[in-house]
Amino acid sequence: MNWQTVLTELAQNVDDMNDEALLGLVNQSERIFLAGAGRSGLALKSFAMRLTQLGKQAFVVGETTIPAITASDLLVIASSSGETTQLVQFAATASEVGATIWLWSTGTDSTIARQSQFVTLLAGKSKFADADTTTKQPMGSLFEQSVWLFGDIFTMDYMQRYQITESFMKARHSNLE
């Protein structure tokens, strides 16, 4: 069954999940902007929701109510390749104003990685990779799943580190559903 394949591949993510510096980075950032394209972007939106529930100001890039990014802000980008044209431009703009950039990717040799102060490597393959043996799943599935799971695990680590309860988060959960 393919369940075991997916679960085995996702288990590759456990190495770099709890980084005190990244927990501190998010804690110190007053506003956090999140950007991704396609399915990676959809997975990153779930992390934006959790950040809001953790009490942070989180904005998904591309929404109409997003404010201007400034030097005191954090931009989180999910890009398996680190070369998605629109995301490269977002990183350039953030860099120009002095914002901190944290890339979630499959490699460190990319345009966005070179502009980023922090890079977290997640399991998966770049959309530019030829068929390879890192995953049996099609296209970017493993990376997209990794983005979702990394966001959830980071949320749990953040809750533990800063003693945030589920009740605190529930009070910030949307009531317009």
Image (tube, rainbow, N blue to C red):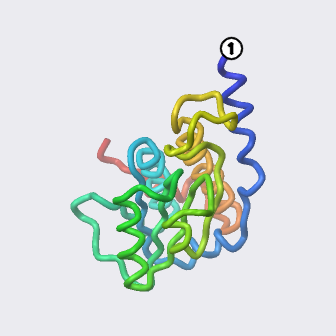
Left or right of residue 88, residue 124 in this image: right
Residue placed under numbered mark 1 in the picture = 1
141 over 49 or under it: above or below? above
Quadrant the C terminus occupies:
top left
Tell me: 116 left or right of 83. right
Residue 65, position as x, y percentages in the image: 24, 64
Task: Check the image and name the residue furthest to the left.
Answer: 64
Residue closer to the observer: 12 or 176: 12
- Looking at the image, which residue sits at the far front? 130
Where, by quadrant of the figure, is residue 52 drawn?
A: bottom left
Label total for image: 1
Provide residue 125's location: percent of width, then percent of height: 59, 43
Residue type pointed to by label 1: Met
Q: State the residue at coordinates (69%, 59%).
A: 157
Q: Residue at x 77, y 53 (%)?
A: 15
Q: Residue at x 28, y 73 (%)?
A: 67
> Looking at the image, is 168 positioned above or below residue 100?
above
Question: SS of the residue at dot 1?
Answer: loop
In the rendering, at what x and y percent does residue 66 appear? Answer: 28, 67
Residue 138, image quadrant? top right
Q: Nearer the viewer, residue 91 or 160?
A: 91
- Residue at the location (37% across, 50% down)? 174
